[in-house]
Image: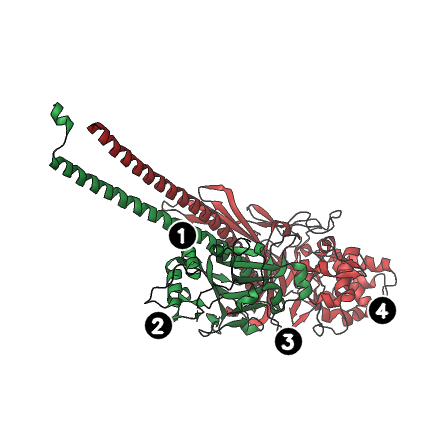
Chain colours: A red, B green
Amino acid sequence: MTARESRGFALILTLSLLALLVLAVYGLGVLTRVGSQTAISSSRQETARQNALLGLEQAVGALQQWAGRDDCATAMAGIAGEPAGSQRRHWCGVWASSGAFLGWLTSGATTSATPSLGSFPIVQLIAQKSVGNTSSADNEFVDAGKIPLMISDASGVSIKLGSYAYWVGDEGVKMSAWVPNGSLPQPGLLIGAPSTPANINRMVGAFQLFDTTNAAKVIAYAQATNLAYAAGKKLTASNLQDSFHHVTLTHWKVAPDGSRLLAGAINMNTTSNVVWRSILESYETVGATHFGTSTKRTSAINAIANGIAATSSGKFANGPFPNVDAFLGSALLSSAVTGATGISVADFSAVMRPMLVSRSDTFRVRAYGEALNPLDASKIEATAFCEAIVQRTLASAADGRGRKFVVTYFRWLSGNDI
Amino acid sequence: MKAKARGFTLVELLVAVVITLVLAGIVLSVTVSTLNGWRRTQDSFTTGSQATLVLDYLERDLHSAVFKPDGQSWLAIDLDYPVTTHGWLSSGVSKPDVLDCLPLDGSRPMLGDARFGRTGAWLRLVTNDAPTTSDSTLPVVVSYQVVRRALNNATPVDAANVRYSLFRTVVDGAATFSGGYHVRNYDNQLALPDSADLLATNVVDFGVWLYARDASGRLALIYPTQTGDVSHSANSTAAVPVAADVFVRILTDEGASMISAIERGIMPAPAEVNSDDWWWRIASAHSNTFIRRVEIQGAGL
């Protein structure tokens, strides 16, 4: 063996060790990169969820700020003239007892009493064609504005990291499907299933008449498909979709004396013909005087539902009736129920007054969050949707903000839930 | 010149040997240190990935937990359940039954030091789960528990493949609706998780602390209230949590092999060390602990 060959062996040994070292360092690098990419992906999903929760907190905060007091009124935006088919018709607005408009409980809404969105990108929080009868105009989806979340870097340049959005839906303007025993504001009178449309008749009928044992077990709207509406026939997803804007599980209202929560009252500030049909048909089951014919009743229903959105029916322009007495004493009700029927306003008021309210205490909030790529704000890296039922409770809120709102039910939404 | 090329002096050889040894030592040291770093990173990556998966599931389920203060247990925690009824491979199990779920550092409780008994916590709750067969998120009963089992289905059982694993079992939406929301009613059904319910391997301890808000609005621990507190039921307004700290201890691959060796009698405790201490010493030295606080969003009505 020559000296040169000896040195060559050392070289091979050194190169082998170096190769091993490089391999280990490379492996370490790959592992770290995979780990960091996994962490980034997880972190962006987490950011999107946190932004959605921020949206939910903003919604609850807005509710507390504007709708905490007993004397304010809430309504769906239909009463401000939003027509059927509008993606803002189911926004919820709040008005002071004076009739002054306070705000729309939707992110990105302008301060105008006419519902409109500011210059924000839009996200659908009730997706198009996901609710309502797709063959009619009454299948409103809901838009909200995406509020950007910005930070400034060291040089003062603004960077958009993500955004959030929320929509507050007024559950009090809907019929309550399930009313536990003993919690009615008016014993013996229940806002019943409207005779039409059939899908909604089945939905409410299953809860209130046909499958009451199982109805007591329903804690989420989607569970209603477990209920039967007739022998051997269960509610379908289609029944639930059609009912979404008109039926809630239970609207809980704070009793007038603030001592307990009552179930089943309806906020009359609604332009849903289906809900008005339910109210007027409920009156007819117990009232002393009657419409006489279904045609007359339908005429009255449409007169109220359409008239309540008009600006000249004894209420503030583009606003709700601020209290029940204002509605019961209005020309709108008088002309609708007495014009072509034998019903007197006094009879109607005596029966229905305890079941009607001008503000709601149960709300459905949908919130959205997204995380953007910090290097390219046009790339949405992750999104998250959530839904909560928010209830106004008997407890007082801090700082004189009326009664306290709490989240009573929460779920993350999958894409199919929107 | 030719004579010089043929050989080395003794001094030259010694110098060459010393230099080679020093260089080899340096290279070896760097290599060993790099390999150790690689192993630590791999351990951290492996346990971290497992923990992220586990904690993400727990976070999502606890976020969406459903409550109604109606006397039923909408959430239940039990420690120290009988391992035989939960499908544990009990032969050879040597995890000590150390219950210290509220360890104190001075007067301050330290979740990271907690030990939740031989079994860890068995958590059941009603939550809104992402759908599998339905197109909508539905309330379901979910269970989390640690089970010691073989990772394969070999017969006879391959003792070297026996691991502590965390299982997440879901009672589907229709069955939950039909069976109601008292989660303890599902105990017989949930006690024996299917192998498809495996969420993460090498989880040797799992626990939960629950908080409610006190009169001043601050978080107050409602479970555990003492170190041997083995059970909780969220069946009343006071027992419904608004937040939870979830804790998992996950063994590294090396730690899992060592624990397996201990339980197979291959790596007995040294004479001067108590066997229970030995198990925990190895587990502690070769595991990582992970804690996440989760806010429970829906408090019920």
Measuring from the top left, give residue B260's x and y in whole percent.
Answer: 44, 58
Label 4 – label 1 distance at C-alpha: 77 Å
Q: Chain of mark 1?
A: B
Amino acid type shown at disc 1: Ser
| Disc nearer the start of the sequence (2/1) | 1
Q: Residue B192, relative to residue A262: is it above or below? A: above
Task: Using the image as rendered, state which of residue A60 and residue A234 is in the foreground.
Answer: A234
Task: Using the image as rendered, state which of residue B125 and residue B167 is in the foreground.
Answer: B167
Label at residue A289: 4
Disc 2 is placed on an element classified as loop
- In the image as oriented, which residue stretches furthest toward the top? B2
Label 2 – label 1 distance at C-alpha: 30 Å
Task: Specify few, some or many for label 3: CA neighbours under 10 Å numbering under 14, 14-19, or 20 or more.
Answer: few
| A306 sits to left or right of A408 | right
Residue wearing tag 2: B106
Q: Chain of mark 2?
A: B
Measuring from the top left, give residue A276's x and y in whole percent.
Answer: 76, 60
Residue wearing tag 1: B44
